[in-house]
Amino acid sequence: MSSFGLLINNFEENSSLLKWKLIRALSAFPLIGSVDLLTKYILNSEHPELRWEAVRSLRIINDKKCRKILKDALKIESNPLVIKMIKLSICKI
C-alpha cells in the first residue's frame, strides 16, 4: 500500500488530534485525493482547527484548483481565524 493509502485508510475513525495530524500530513501529497479530502474538511468540519489546518495544507499543495476551493470556502466560513488563514492562503497561491 502507498504512503497516501496508509494515511487515508480509516481516516474517519481517528480522534480529532490524529485527524489534525493526518490533515497536516496530506500537504505532502499533491494528489487529487488529498485535495478532495482537504476540501471536504474545509467545507464540512465542525472543528475550526481542522478547517484551519486543511486550508494550510491546500496552500502548501498550491494547485490552481486550491485557489478556487479557498475562494468558495471564504464565502461560507464564519470563524475569524479560519477566515484569516483562507485570505492569507489565497494571496500565496
Image (cartoon, rainbow, N blue to C red):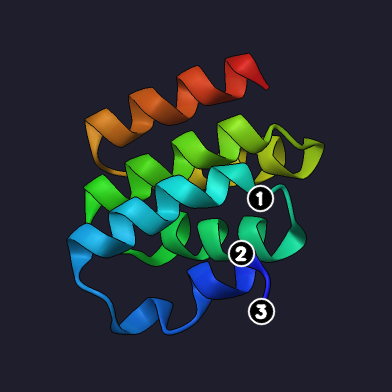
The answer to whether residue 67 is visible is yes
Q: Residue 3 — which label?
A: 2
Q: Secondary structure at mark 3?
A: loop
The mark lying in front, picked from 2 and 1, is: 2
The residue sitting at 63% across, 59% down in the picture is 34
| SS category of the residue bearing label 2 | helix
Q: Quadrant of the N terminus?
A: bottom right
Compared to 12, does 24 lie above or below?
A: above
Q: Where is residue 20, by image quadrant?
A: bottom left
Q: Residues within 10 Å of mark 1 (few under 14, many from 20)?
A: some
Image side of residue 69 versus residue 78, left or right: right
Residue extending farthest to the front is 1
Tell me the distance, in whole angstroms, between the alpha carbons under discs 3 and 2.
7 Å
Q: CA distance from mark 2 to mark 1?
A: 9 Å
The image shows residue 26, relative to residue 79, as above or below, that is: below
> Could you tell me residue 80's position as x and y percent?
24, 30
> Residue at 46% of width from left, 34% of height from top?
56
Q: Which residue is mark 3?
A: 1
Mark closer to the chain start, 2 or 1:
2
Circles 1, 3 touching at the beta carbon (< 8 Å): no
For disc 1, the marked residue is 29
Where residue 76 appears, as percent x and y from the top left, is 42, 49
Q: Amino acid at mark 1?
A: Phe
Q: Nearer the viewer, residue 15 or 73?
A: 15
Whether residue 75 is visible:
no
The x and y percentages for residue 52 are 34, 40
